[in-house]
Amino acid sequence: LGTEKLSDIGGSLNLSFSLLDKKLRKNIFFVEGAIEKYTSASSDQIDPTTLSSASRTDEHFYPSIAWSRKNEKTGNTIGLNAAYSTEFDYKSYGAGLLFTKTSKDKNAEFTAKLNVFFDRWKVILPAELRPDGYPTGAEEDSEGIPYKPRNSFNASFSYSKVVNPNFQWMILFDPSYQEGLLSTPFHRVYFTDKTLKVEKLPGTRLKLPVGLRGSYFAGDRTVLRGYYRFYADNWGLQAHTVQVEPVYKITPFMSLTPHYRFNAQKGMRYFNAYMEASTDAAFYSSDTDLSTFTSHLMGLGIRLSTPGGILGITNWKSIDLRYGYYSRSTNLHAHILSLSMQFR
């Protein structure tokens, strides 16, 4: 019920440094700092009786660091990474490993990534479902709210192959396992008998996405890119995603990138719309993101990259401007605008 109007303004700064060690192995150090500021009408309804609840506006801050080392003789690359993320109701700590093996002719490559994330949620409850004396969750009234864990164990395996000078493909498999508090504590669920409870979902979740990418160079000016992914998990959620993204070079230094993505999702078995959940159900949610829907994302990007720099700045390598319009069959619509600049 009501609106899910949201504005999200974010930015990130990425720094990459490379050096050769004594054994002539290439070491790359990567540092990223990112922050978002958002407003959320749906989160603001945690406590609709107040002028500003725990998350009417908030900041999301998530820095990360990474290191990798490539041995040209063996074709092996190893790497490590660490990440941190914080928001008003949770904190997350992450770490990961990377291994890549490139074939001797450099036409094939296998990559394996392993990442873990350890999260802690504040159990903020909707106003009408709080026990007497339970804090609201606002900054000045959060003492005594319990924290619950949510742990994620993610893997990513990919194999890419250059078939010929014009065509290459990649297959991806990204399994993940989660445990802990996987439901959102302040999401309400209304039952058929008009009673009200907090969303409740299983404490574990296994996700199994498989994807396939392809790139075809159709002449000097055009690159055709395609992507397909199938997703399934043990909550009964399934999805098919198809994306096409041709690149057309207006000049050797300027290119246009129209893009289109279609997604068809079958909702999880625990989803029920407003006042449709059974009082006998063990698990229940009315989160529309977990329902059955179709969605479309279409847009256009433009990229400029000149050898002598941009606007007389020789270190300014490239600039990308990208717009997308998102539409979902649940009556959700969004405009997305992003700007990326690279310096070296």
Image (cartoon, rainbow, N blue to C red):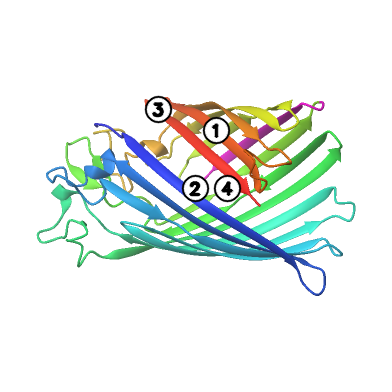
Label 1 amino acid? Arg
- In the image, the segment drawn in magenta is 219-234
Residue at 55% x, 33% y: name it.
322
Give the foreground label among 2 and 1: 1
**Mark 3 to mark 1: distance in Å?**
17 Å
Residue nearest the viewer, comparing 104 with 292:
104
Say whether residue 255 is left or right of residue 6.
right
Q: Residues within 10 Å of mark 1 (few under 14, many from 20)?
A: some
N-terminal of the pair, mark 4 or mark 2, is 4
Q: Residues within 10 Å of mark 3 (few under 14, many from 20)?
A: some
Determine which residue is flagged by label 4.
Answer: 208
Secondary structure beneath disc 2? loop
Q: Position of residue 342 (x, y in %)?
A: 61, 46
N-terminal of the pair, mark 3 or mark 2, is 2
Determine which residue is flagged by label 1.
Answer: 322
N-terminal of the pair, mark 4 or mark 3, is 4
Label 4 amino acid? Leu
Secondary structure beneath disc 1? strand
Q: Are marks 3 and 2 in contact (CB under 8 Å)?
A: no
Q: Residue furthest bottom?
A: 22
Give the foreground label among 3 and 2: 3
Secondary structure beneath disc 4? loop
Say whether residue 272 is left or right of residue 267.
left
Q: Are marks 4 and 3 in contact (CB under 8 Å)?
A: no
Determine which residue is flagged by label 2.
Answer: 234
Does the magenta-highlighted stretch encompass residue 226?
yes
Give the foreground label among 4 and 3: 3
